[in-house]
Amino acid sequence: MSFLLPCPHCGPRDVNEYQCAGEVTTRPEASPSQRELASYVYFRQNVAGIQREWWFHRLGCEAWFQAERDTRTNEVLSVELVDPARRDAAPGPEAPALPDTPAA
Ligand SMILES: [Zn+2]
């Protein structure tokens, strides 16, 4: 399946240029309980409808951004560069390693 996803820097591009890093989650506080940590790492909403997701433009400008996408139709409603100071600004644990990051 293919659709166009607009990068905030580059404009509409084929979705195959991107890496999806999953839905936006909120990191737990500094000392999370085991339950909070397990929930953050393993559980997702997986909605059938509008979902806010992290995307990485891997074959373009290499920007991280968030998009609101309808998971039923792949219609992209909005894209946004995110202020890194926000608590939910870091991609979740399923984010791909950056090209200059050695694989674990
Ligand atoms: Zn781009």
Image: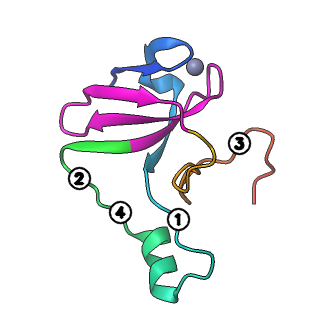
**Is 97 on the left or on the right of 80, as rendered?**
right
Q: Secondary structure at mark 2?
A: loop
Disc 2 to disc 4: CB gap under 8 Å: no
Mark seen at residue 27: 1
Badge 3 is on which residue? 98
Q: Amino acid at mark 1?
A: Arg
Give the residues drawn in magenta, as a range. Answer: 53-82
* 79 within the magenta span: yes
Residue 77 image position (x, y, % from top left):
28, 27
- Residue at the disc numbered 2: 47
- Which mark sits nearer the N-terminus, 3 or 4? 4
Q: Are marks 2 and 1 in contact (CB under 8 Å)?
A: no
Give the alpha-carbon distance from disc 3 to disc 1, as whole Å.
20 Å
What secondary structure is marked by label 1? loop
Q: CA distance from mark 2 to mark 3?
A: 27 Å
Q: Which residue is the extreme one toward the bottom? A: 34
Tell me which residue sits at (18%, 48%) in the image. Answer: 48
Q: Residues within 10 Å of mark 4 (few under 14, many from 20)?
A: few
Q: Amino acid at mark 4?
A: Arg
Q: Which residue is mark 4?
A: 44
The part of the image, by quadrant, that contains residue 63 is top right
Asked if labels 4 and 3 touch by Cβ distance under 8 angstroms, the answer is: no
Q: Label 3 sits on what residue type? A: Leu
What x and y, as percent, mark residue 6? Answer: 43, 18
